[in-house]
Image: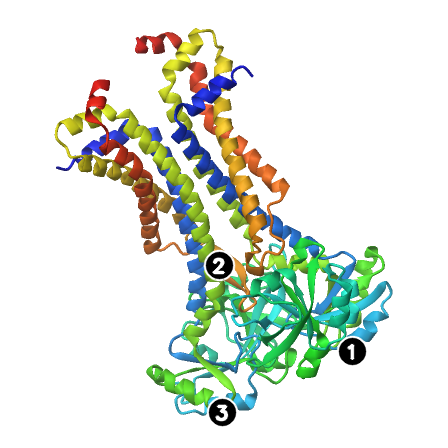
Amino acid sequence: MKYLKLIRANLFRSKRRTILTMLSVAAALFLFVTLRSVLTTLDDAKEVGSETRMVTRSSISIVFPLPEAYYQWLQTVPGVNSVSWSSWFGGVYRDPKDFFATFAVDAESYLPMYPEIDMPAEQREAFLAERSAAIVGSGLMERFGWSLNQTIGLRSTIYSPGEEWPFTIRAVYEPTNPSFGDENFFFHYDYLYEKSQYAQPGWYIMQLSDPEAAASVAETIDEHYKNSRAATRTETERAFQTGFITMYGNVGFLLNAIGMAVFFAILFVAANTMMMSARERTNEQAVLKMLGFSDRLLFALVMTEAAVITVVGGVLGVAGAKLLFDLSGFQGAGFLPGFEIKWSTAIVGLVIAVLLGVISGFVPAWQALRLPISQTLRRVA
Amino acid sequence: MKIPVIYNLRSLRQRPVSTLTTAVGMGLVVLVFIAMMALSRGFRAALVETGSTDNVIVLRKGSDSELVSGIGRGTAQTIAAFPFVADGPDGRPLVSPEVYVLISLERLTEGEALVVARGINPEAFDVRKNVEIVEGRMLNPGAPEILVGKSIVDRFANTGIGDKINFASRDWTVVGHFAAGGSSFESEIWGENEQFMPAFRGEVFQTVTFRMDDPSAFESIKSSLEGDPRLQVDALREYDFYAGQSALLSQILNFAAVFIAGIMAIGAIFGAINTMYAAVGARSPEIAVLLTLGFRPFSVMSSFLLEATMIAVLGGLLGGLFSLPINGIVTSTTNWQSFSEVAFAFRVTPDLLFRGVIFAVVMGLIGGFFPARRAARQPVVKAVREI
């Protein structure tokens, strides 16, 4: 490590250039890990669906409701421990663009099935005891500045549009799994039923005693309702969630393509800098060689210098992204619950930074390696 | 006095690698910008072109999408009888009451998509000027037949003419393919109202769309429909309605374009600053000569800014060139406002290419500013001594 000083001196030779290059690498890596985190968040959203819960919905599509009568029979299916249901309410608070998810649920059966919805016991009691009560995620509370026990009005895009439905927030939940999202809104299905003649379960959820039974349970249910007025489609909750995520289309391809463009754009910037700085030092390199520095050592020195620049830049960018998103609690306006820069993503970012350094340093390092001493020195003299 | 442009051109040619790498870096930034904007515009265009300004779409009061709307047969007939509804060549009113539902179909690639199944009467083809059957034939009344939009054909199985698709517990025979000028209708499946009603939601339409006999009278038509206590409906210009359906996603895509391209631009600008400083540094004797010859510092500064701009323009042109192959590529996504999947094509338009170049020039000017100022402020004596 006796060459550290030399590398340092070279880095400080043109501070401005070194810093600017670091910052441009930092900007690129910031962008890179942010885009990648969008992907990992979407992937995690698939995993949120449990393998021991199953979802039964209309075979036509999720927008068709199912009869309430199915509840009774579903409970008798072998392998099913408990049954609950949920309905999409399409709630809007003031501005439709401030999207969040609102579900009307059969609370008595729903909450025990979803330990992810974690809240203080007394709030849970208060919610269960009141028909127009609601459970709201902590993130949503923050987004709209609501407080516990406040009564708010939501409009529904589905049920009697135009009318405001009063809800009293009796419980605030904190998701045990961040990907579950802290921006959901739950209320009693009974309340929906009381106020609208059109209320019907949107989908049923079943807790299995054994995940191995999933396939047979699905087959039993779908076979049973096959020729009925409302045929069903049953799958594990995970498959159901994955279905929603794939509806975004090929986001992965788009983000990866952008990631590639970012990588190459910065590669060009970094490579250009390395070459410029090497060109200025051709003479020095010749002198070093004459002093007995081996070709390989010189190669390594130039490479190390490049790597230091990109790695420092990379650390800045990755850490900056991590800090920014951790502190701001960014969740993509509700579309990316649990958005965070994972450590695995951060590491991938740093690997990319090293790669940038190696590739951008290669040409000047190779030139240093092949530098003919005599000719270069002759030029100096 | 101005320093001749040829000086800058020759200087750039003196260091081709540096010039090119800087330009290509900028070009990639411009590419990403153009590509993201082309995505956003393609999506928006697909929805905007769906609606016509001559048509009115009527929905249940308070509905923000076709899916949640509902209009009874009686109401539909009342609307058709209004005098402001245009008549077709056969004297029948140009009214299209429609069933609108979403069905889950398995994509050819992976996963399911929610596809619009729209129930129509033959009048739909007269009300919608941009829709035409490009292959096969029209639906036969009373038969379980469907027409599929052009962009459905490539993305879902069993959509060839004569094939059968199963949904709502029935088999439907594909008898034709239709085109709709690249609009989102091309992502839909059309069948007869009288077939779709019993198969889906029963005796109710979702929307009624009609042609106005005088499109300039829209405001009064709107108020007579919305003010009619029998109807309880909202009336919108069809064009505005579908354009509105694209608002949320276009907004997100535009934001993403600016965010991503903006951050990339920071990196590229720093790169440009480095390049220009190096250029200024290497040419300080030349600059000294220019100043000694009597060129004003301002001319020197302009000259270097011009040089930075030249690199940027080259980058912008490269970015535009890289982006050309993207034009026309079809992709699809779910429009969460209507909950349905829409296929659309990237649109790289001349004006977008122009914006890309402008974007590059802005990067070049910012990146060139400080180095150019440094060149202009160079103390002549010191620089000359270096020679």
Q: The residue under label 1 is which amino acid type?
A: Ala
Amino acid type of disc 2? Ile
Query: Which of the numbered marks, if any, corresponds to residue B252?
Result: 2
Q: Please, what is the three-letter code of the amino acid marked with disc 3?
A: Thr
Write the residue at 43% across / 11% down: A288
Which chain is mark 1 on? A
Q: Position of residue B161 (x, y in %)?
A: 55, 66
Residue B77 versus residue A98 in the image, above or below: below
The residue wearing badge 3 is B78
Q: Is label 2 or label 3 in front?
A: 2
Q: Chain of mark 3?
A: B
Specify the quadrant that holds the N terminus of chain A: top right
Q: Chain of mark 2?
A: B
Q: Mark 1, mark 3: which one is toward the viewer? A: 1
Q: Residues within 10 Å of mark 3 (few under 14, many from 20)?
A: few
- Can the viewer see residue B311? no
Residue at image point 51% right, 27% down: A307
Q: Is disc 1 in the same subunit as disc 3?
A: no
Quadrant position of residue B193: bottom right
Q: Position of residue A220 (x, y in %)?
A: 81, 66
Mark seen at residue A69:
1
| The quadrant where residue B93 appears | bottom left
Query: Where residue B86 appears, x then y in whole percent?
Result: 39, 86
Q: Nearer the viewer, mark 1 or mark 2?
A: 2
**For the point 43% across and 44% down, which residue is it?**
B264
- Residue A10 image offset from top left, x and y in percent: 43, 21
Discs 2, 3: same chain: yes
Confirm whether residue A81 shows in the render. Answer: yes
Q: Which type of secondary structure does the marked residue at label 2 adopt?
A: helix
The reply to whether the C-beta atoms of the residues labelled 2 and 3 are less than 8 Å apart is no
Mark 1 and mark 2 in contact? Answer it, CB < 8 Å: no
How many neighbours does mark 2 have within 10 angstroms: few (below 14), some (14-19), or many (20 or more)?
few
